[in-house]
Amino acid sequence: MYSIIDIETTGGNKNTGRITEIAAFNHDGNKVVDSFSTLVNPEVPIPPFIVNLTGITDDMVANAPKFEEIADELDRFTSNSTFVAHNVNFDFGFIREEFRRLGREFKRKRLCTVQLSRETFPDLSSYSLGKITDQLGIELNGHHRAEADAKATIKLFEKIIAEKQNTGLFEVNFGLNDLSHIKSPYISLDVFKSIPDDCGIFKIYNSADELIFVKRSSQILSALSKKLQQNGTRNSQDLIKETYRLDWEVTGSGLLAQILEAEHTLADNPRYNFGKFSMKSRYGLYVIENSSQTYLTIKKRRRNDEPFVVFSSYYEGLEYLKSLSNKHKLSLEERKVGKYTQPEVPIDGNYETLLFPRSRYLIVDESPEIHQRAIILVEDEARVSWGHVDIETSQDRLSADDLERTLPFRPEHMMIIRHFLRKSRYEDIIRLED
């Protein structure tokens, strides 16, 4: 059974946004067999731009049930089915967070019709619901209302089933049924059944117990199963031949998963990661010293160099320099280097105090356990430690004993954290006194 679901919300962040509408349809693989649909009182005002997008107003939801009033029914409705949505982690993440606010866990197997559509219809120009329905001739009236979007997703799902019937497209999301192509005494169906489909990282080792691949995912089992499919590229086939042992780490926190993926990639240089992780550091901040002046500048990274700060783009690095110069009242100059203009910030004194100011703060994020939260400690914009604490632990009772691991300084960790904070995906941020 599949529960095909769409929601509307007050915003894009599950930590601060709330659900305003839910539509769910139970589908047996052939047809819809049951439905559940309701407006939801979010208990917070709906922002004007969301009203313009969805048409759902505060007046419309004023007398609608609160989420806690429909939680039991939604739990029962989806209890024996796979959660299906277009961009499933968005819808699932919001619903899981609503359950967590009630002190309840919500776990379901998940399928994403965006991912399935990419595999089934690889030549489409766009996979957004509004555009893919137009390209495939699916009717979508009332876009950005939950029931209309869910019904369109049903039609899309049925087209995917018709195109991919009996090809194993769905099974690979939940563990491989046939493991005969993996030659290892350590990998069996029982091993796959023990792997959670939660947020974290998975690691693949060869027979010499060398880490040869690492990847983060919001669904570890699904991502690992897809990685070990037989019908992949030559590199994928070579990886499968060398696969001997699997390991995984459930983090709950997307930030922590991304940091650990980067740490393993940089520290262990897994052969099939090709020196890359999910966020590329293309530019770096460098300290240039000559006889007359010391200055900071942004340049494209070269192999094996070691910049003090790294960035995913030149413009990100330029904004960092601008912010730094404004904060410390420094001048931002431009120097012509061949055909290009190079930004420079002349400095006096110790550049480390500029780049790594004394500071300590905790980022609070999701944990695998409902009664816990992940905490990521950032010190002096350089060192990163992390651990998990009980959700009831007060700020003044947090201590170094709560931290399970401290990572070595890597500018890539701070790049990941800057991106994460900029998108405000965290649950809370706590500034600590020295």
Image (tube, grey):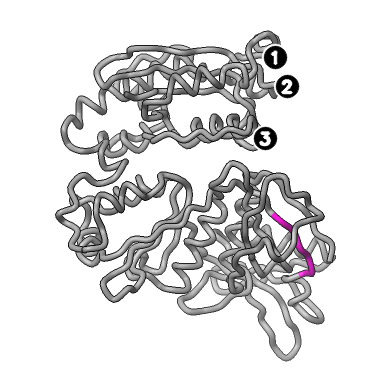
Residue designated by label 1: 58
Q: Which residues are magenta?
A: 357-362
The structure residue drawn at horizontal position 58% and vertical position 48%, both measured from the top left corner, is 367
Which badge, 2 or 3, is on the more N-terminal residue? 3
Q: Residue 93 colored magenta?
A: no
Q: Nearer the viewer, residue 428 or 315?
A: 428
Q: Give the CA distance from mark 2 to mark 3.
A: 12 Å
Q: Quadrant of residue 284?
A: bottom right
Residue 238, x across and y down, in percent? 21, 64
Residue at x 75%, y 88% (from the top left corner): 292
In this rendering, position of residue 349 left or right of residue 413 = right
Say which residue appears at 64% left-offset and 56% top-offset.
418
The three-letter amino acid code for the residue at tag 1 is: Asp
Residue that numbered label 3 is attached to: 16
The secondary element bearing badge 3 is classed as: loop
Examine the rendered structure and indicate whether residue 95 appears above or below residue 229: above
